[in-house]
Amino acid sequence: MNTDVVEQYFDEGMVALLPQPPMAAAVAVPVTRSIAFVSADAALGARLSESLRGQGINLVHRVEELVALSRDPQGLGGVLLDCRNEPALATLTPLWRTACRAQAAPMFALTAHSDRERRVDALANGMVFIDDHAGDVAAIAADLAAGVVLLGEEPIQVMIIDDDFGTSFCVKKILESAGIGCHAYIDADMAIAHLDKIRPDVIVLDFMMPGCDGVDVCDRIRARPDGGATQILFFSGNVDESSRVGLLGVLGDDYLSKAARPRDLIAAVFARGLRARTWRGAVSRAR
């Protein structure tokens, strides 16, 4: 990788889903979402389906992804792809991306805890990775249920603030290719005026802009009542290490070079978006 940003998330556990304890089997919970489980592991599918029934999720096991897609185009509430033994996530995600986006349905990847590269791939494809917990079905079900709540009914929302139209346009197209909702602005004042309407999970912020710099914009965002909930990712052509440390010192959440590969940009933004959703959910439950 050109950057170490994505790996940092795993080292610090920044994208771990908040585990939710499974509900008691005696509690009747209406089914609120059906999720397709694409896997050759029929035994896991059966046990996972049973575990999720008490959490309002109907898991429909599918062995063949093409058959799954043809059967579940309507009312699709999401998909869990078993990626533990697949050569690459890229072979499965194109089959589901269009259908999932059309219905604002989240995509999840079942991965092994030790497979760091596969988890980065999942984030780079706009997917939440679900830990296989070494076969602990209750733990897998809890993570999946938490992920459904985390993403809700709309994709991760991102605001791009960069005075260079070409950069804003390219970043927007890259992120949208992974199912991330994007709103691009070349004027910082206009972007800040629209914060309440968009409520972005992540702000991709250029550092050097005419009239005001990224530090000033960051300060103005943090001063707002909900300013701490939004993750700010500085996006700059300046790769100097001291500059990176300085940017993080002004309450930015992370830094990514404009020379980063598209997959690294998607993974970093998606991971930060999940962190923002997790933080907001924790605050909401505490109230």
Image: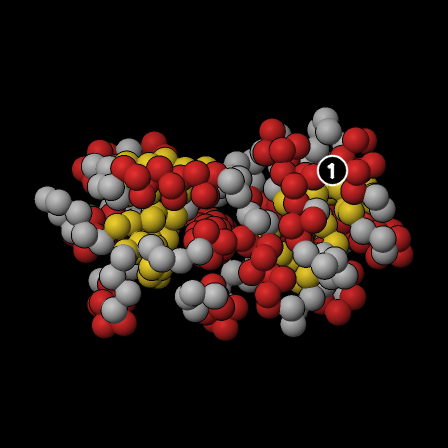
Residue 242 or residue 201, whichever sits in front: 242
Which quadrant holds residue 168?
top left
Residue 171 rendering spot, x and y as whole percentages: 38, 44
Q: Residue at x 81, y 51 (%)?
A: 39
Residue type marked 1:
Ser
10 Å neighbourhood of mark 1: few (<14), some, or many (≥20)?
some
Residue 234 lies left or right of residue 175; in this view the side is: left
Which quadrant holds residue 187?
top left
Residue extending furthest top? 74
Which residue is under mark 1? 34
Residue 166 rendering spot, x and y as whole percentages: 30, 39
Local secondary structure at mark 1 = strand
Kindly tell me whether residue 286 is visible in this rendering. Answer: no
Residue 221 lies left or right of residue 141; in this view the side is: left
Residue 55 rendering spot, x and y as whole percentages: 72, 47
Q: Residue at x 28, y 56 (%)?
A: 236
Q: Residue at x 43, y 69 (%)?
A: 4
Residue 70 rendering spot, x and y as whole percentages: 79, 31
Q: Residue at x 22, y 54 (%)?
A: 207
Q: Relative to 275, is 210 above or below?
A: above
Q: Relative to 223, is 166 above or below?
A: above
Which quadrant holds residue 258?
bottom left
